[in-house]
Image (cartoon, rainbow, N blue to C red):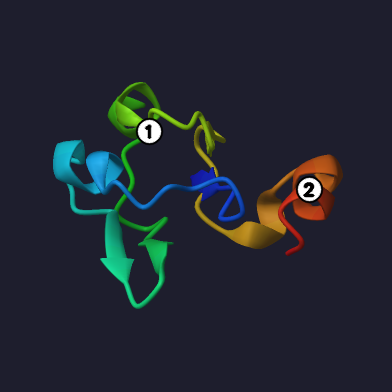
Amino acid sequence: MIMIDHEGCIKCVGCSSVCPKNAIEYIGERMATYPELCIDCGLCIKACPANVIELFPKIKDISQLPPEARKKYNV
C-alpha cells in the first residue's frame, strides 16, 4: 500500500504516470490511491520529486497499517 503526504504533494502526477497498474490518479485537488491495485513496485516513490510517498509492502487495507503510520497519515 502506498500512502501520500498530501500536504507536501505538488500534484505533478509523476507517480500516476509511472504506475503500471493505475493505482494512483489525480482527482479533484489531490492524488487518489487504490491499494487493491498496487503491486508494491515502488516506481511511484522513485518518480516523486517531493518525496511524499511511502510504501507499506503487502498491506492492502488501511486497518493493517502500523499505528505510527495511521497517526502520521491521520487514518
Q: Residue at x 42, y 55 (%)?
A: 35
From the viewer's perspective, is residue 16 above or below residue 75? above
Residue found 75% across the figure and 44% down from its top: 69
Residue 41 showing in the rendered view: no
Amino acid at dot 2: Lys
Indicate whether 72 appears above or below 34.
above
- Numbered-mark total: 2
53, 7: nearer the viewer: 7
Q: Mark 2 points at which residue?
A: 72
Residue closer to the observer: 72 or 39: 72
Disc 2 crowd, CA 10 A, few/some/many (<14, 14-19, 20+): few
Going by the picture, which residue comes out furthest to the top? 46
Q: In this view, does 10 lie above or below 54?
A: below
Is 25 or 13 nearer to us in this picture? 13
Mark closest to the chain's N terminus, 1 or 2: 1
- Residue type highlighted by circle 1: Asp
Residue lying farthest to the bottom in this orientation: 28
Does residue 9 appear anywhere in the picture? yes
Q: Is residue 19 left or right of residue 57?
A: left
Which quadrant is the C terminus positioned in? bottom right
Residue behind mark 1: 40
Tell me the SS state at disc 1: loop
Q: Where is residue 65 in the image (x, y as percent from the top left)?
A: 70, 48
- Look at 57% across and 59% down and name the residue there: 61
Q: How crowded is mark 1: few (under 14 residues within 10 Å), some or many (20 or more)?
A: some
Distance in Å between CA atoms under marks 1 and 2: 20 Å
